[in-house]
Image: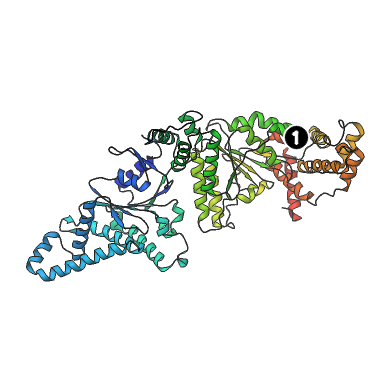
Amino acid sequence: MATSVNEFLRKAGRILNAGQSRALILTGNIHDVFHNNKGKSDEYCSLVEYLTASWNLPNLILVVYELNGPIRFIRDKDSEKVRKAWIEWRLGMSADQLAINRMMDTDKVAAEVDEVTGMYDDSFQKAVSNPTLALELMRQMCLCSRTKVGDSHFLKENLLIVVEGADMLLPDAPITSLNDMDRQRVSICHDWFSDLGFVNGDDSVVMIAESRSQLNQRIARLPQLIDVEVPSPDFDTRKHFISWFSRNDSKGRKIQLWGTQTELAELTAGLSLHALMQLLKGVRHGRAKLSQEEVVDKVEDFIKSQLGEEVVEFKKPGHSLNDVIGFSRLKSFLDKEVIPRFGMDSGEALPGAAIGGPIGAGKTFIFEAVASELDMVVLVIKNLRSKYYGETDVIFERLRRVLMALSRVLIFIDEADTQLGGVGADTHATERRLTGKIQSMMSDPLLRGKVIWLLVTARIHLLSPDIRRPGRVGDLIIPVLDPEGKDREAFLDWVASPVVSGKLTGEDRERFAKVTEGWSAAGFAALRSELKAKAKLQGNNDKLTMNEVIAIINDLLPPAIGETRRYQTLQALVNCTRRSLMPDPKVTDEERAGWAMEIRQLEAKGIR
C-alpha cells in the first residue's frame, strides 16, 4: 500500500543511496505503528522494527541502539563479522596477516588477540548502561568499516546504525549546563558526523527524535544532518488500518460502527494509529456500536494530549450569526463573502482574517458565531510558548503535524497581539522564531483551504506587519466598531426587552439613547444583565419603568478607558482592508490621513 506515511522511508532511502548525507534524523510521528508487509508479514509494528524490516538488505549490517539497552545486530552472524573486523582493525592487520604472525610467534600474537578481544567484549557489555561508551563504540565501528588493509576494507558490508531516543542522548541545553557525560556524547557525535571520512564513506547513522529542536544545537545545526519527517497517518493509511484491524481478531469479533469504515477513517483525522487502535480495541471488547460522538471526543482528547490543554482547546460555539445583535452590514458581509470564501478550494480560499476594534466591541462573540456557521473543527490557541528551554519549537511542530493531519480546521487566536509577538531586533529569539513559523504556515500552499486563521485583537497595530500582509490574514482585516444608527437601536431594544413592558417609542427611546451615548456592545450586554438583576431584586413581575432604568444607568460610572478605546478604534480603521466595511464607504484619503494624525496625537499623550 503506497501512502504518504511511508513516503518518508523512500525519501530517507534516496538520501542515503545518493550519499547526500550519512547522518539523518527522523522526526515527527515517531511513536506510532507502521504497516510491515515485507515478505509474508502483514502486521503493524514500531518505527524501529519497520525500518529494520525495510532496510534488511544483504549489503548492509543493521545495528540498533536504544537508550540503556545493548547495541544489537538484526542478524546474529553480523555481530561476529563486526567483532572479527574490529579486532583485526585494532591489531592493524588483516586475517591473512594475523594467521601468518600467529605461525611466527604464537604466544605473543595470541596474547594480543586475547587482549583486544577482551577489550571489545568488555566494551559491549559496559555499553548497556553507558550510552557515552555505546556511542563511541559505534563511532569506532564506522572507523573500522571504512579503514582499508591492502586493497580491501576490514568490513566488506556497510553499516547502517539506527539510534533511538537521540533527544535523550544529546539533550538540548546550553553546553555550560550539561554534565560531563552529556558534553562528551555531544563531542563524540559532533566529531563523528563532521569527519570527512564518515561524510564521504558508505556507512550511515539514522537517529530518531520527535523534533530536531530537541537535539543539542551543536548537533542539530550541523548542515550534514538532514531531517526527514515522519507524517501523521493520512486518510488512506487510517482506512487501511481500520480494515486490517477488523479482519485480524483471533476470536472473530466484529467492530460495530454507526456507518462505514470509510466514514470512520474520515472522522478520525488527527489521530495516530496507536490512538485509533485504542479506540477500536475498546469498541471490540465492549461489543457496543461506536458512535460519531465517541470518535470526535477521542480526537479532541488525543490532540489535547499531544499539544497540552494549556496550549489549545476545542471550541464549540453555541451561538450563530442570528444571535448577534446589530452589526447588520458586517453580518451581511460575513454571510455573503467571508464564509463562502472560507469554504472554497485552496486556490480561491482566504487564508483567514484579522479582526480589530476597541475592547468590548463584540469581536470574539461575532467571530465565534462565524466559526459556528462554518461547521468546522475550531482550535483555540491559548499559549504556544513554554517556560521550558527549547519546548516552544517542539510545541509548534506538534501543532503543525496536527493541522496537516486534520481535514479542515479553524484556528481561533483571541488577544492575538499577545500570542503572536514581533520579529524585530528587540524581540526575544524564541518569540521571533515562533512568529516567523506561524507566518510561514499562514501562507503555506499545502494548508490553504484546510486551515483558516482568525486573529482577534483590540491592538491590530501590534500584529507583525508580516502577518498583516496580503497572502496571510492581511487579505482581510475587519474592523468591529461600536454600534451606530439602526444597529444601536437594535441594542437599545435588546437591552430593554426583558425588563420594560412593550417596545421603546418616542420620548423613552430618546432618553434611553441619550444616556447610553457611545456605549459598546459589551457595555450594553453588561447593562442588560444589571437591569435584569435589579428587576428581579425589586419584584414587580421582574419589570422596571423607564425612569427606574434611567436612574440605574445614571448611577453607573464608565471606566476611564475612553481615549484607549478611541485609539484602538482608529487603529482598526486605518488597518481595515475593505472600504465597504468603513462607517462611511465613501471615506476619503484626507479623512484617513486625519485618523493617522489623531493616532499620533494620542500616542504623544502616552496612549498605546
x and y percentages locating residue 528 in the rendered image: 81, 40
Q: Nearer the viewer, residue 351 or 389?
A: 389
Q: Position of residue 219 (x, y in %)?
A: 40, 58
Give the residue at mark 1: 325
What residue is at 86 percent from the left and 41 percent from the top? Answer: 535
**Viewer-proximal residue, 464 or 231?**
231
Q: Position of residue 119 (x, y in %)?
A: 24, 66
Q: Nearer the viewer, residue 556 or 260?
A: 260
Give residue 449's position: percent from left, percent from top.
Answer: 54, 34
Query: In the image as oriented, which residue stretches furthest toward the bottom?
Result: 108
Q: Is residue 513 left or right of residue 23?
A: right
Amino acid carrying label 1: it is Ile
Across the whole image, how many numbered discs are drawn on residues?
1
- What residue lies at 49% left-to-right and 48% top-to-bottom? 397
Q: Quadrant of residue 235?
A: top left
Q: From what the image shows, is residue 259 above or below residue 67?
A: above
Of the 4 image quadrants, the one containing the N terminus is: top left
**Residue 577 visible in image:** no
Residue at the (76%, 43%) spot, across then down: 522
